[in-house]
Image (tube, rainbow, N blue to C red):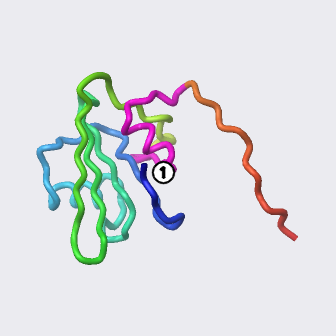
Amino acid sequence: MLSLPPTVKIFVAAGAVDLRKGFDGLSAVTREVIAMDPLSGHLFVFINRRRDRAKILVWDRSGYWLLYKRLERGRFHVPRTPVAGASHIELEATELALLLEGIDLSGARRRPRWEPLVA
């Protein structure tokens, strides 16, 4: 299970990415496709064309981390489609954890959350 602080955002590239790329290649994709700074400390998720492999790139103040997952069966299902013209999708940590398990969230319905009253 992932335990991330609430300040960390998770961005998934909407299109397929060539996962032969390493640290430098994926940081370039982050800048060009997602239009974000890869040194921000946020998580950037890239999925291949067959949707059975994923890489996550993150910077932790001393260097990059590159996490790689291959599903032996099934495919990764991104829970929603990007807004028109967007090149990425923003997820929550729970959605990322389910995505990495290969669970399809397309039919899931989010319950209303409690929010404090604004005075």
Residue at the disc numbered 1: 93
27 lies left or right of 99: left
Quadrant housing the C terminus:
bottom right
How many residues crowd around disc 1 within 10 Å: few (fewer than 14), some, or many (20 or more)?
Answer: some
43 lies left or right of 53: right
The kind of secondary structure element at disc 1 is: helix
Bounds of the magenta segment: 86-106
Q: Residue at x 80, y 62 (%)?
A: 116
State the image coordinates of residue 49 (x, y, percent, origin top left). 24, 31
72 lies left or right of 118: left
State the image coordinates of residue 60 (x, y, percent, origin top left). 30, 71
State the image coordinates of residue 16 (x, y, percent, origin top left). 27, 37
Q: Amino acid at mark 1?
A: Ala
Q: Quadrant of residue 63?
A: bottom left
Q: Residue at x 25, y 52 (%)?
A: 67
**Whether residue 95 is situated above or below residue 60 in the rendered picture:** above
Q: Residue at x 21, y 55 (%)?
A: 26
Closest to the observer: 71 or 52? 71
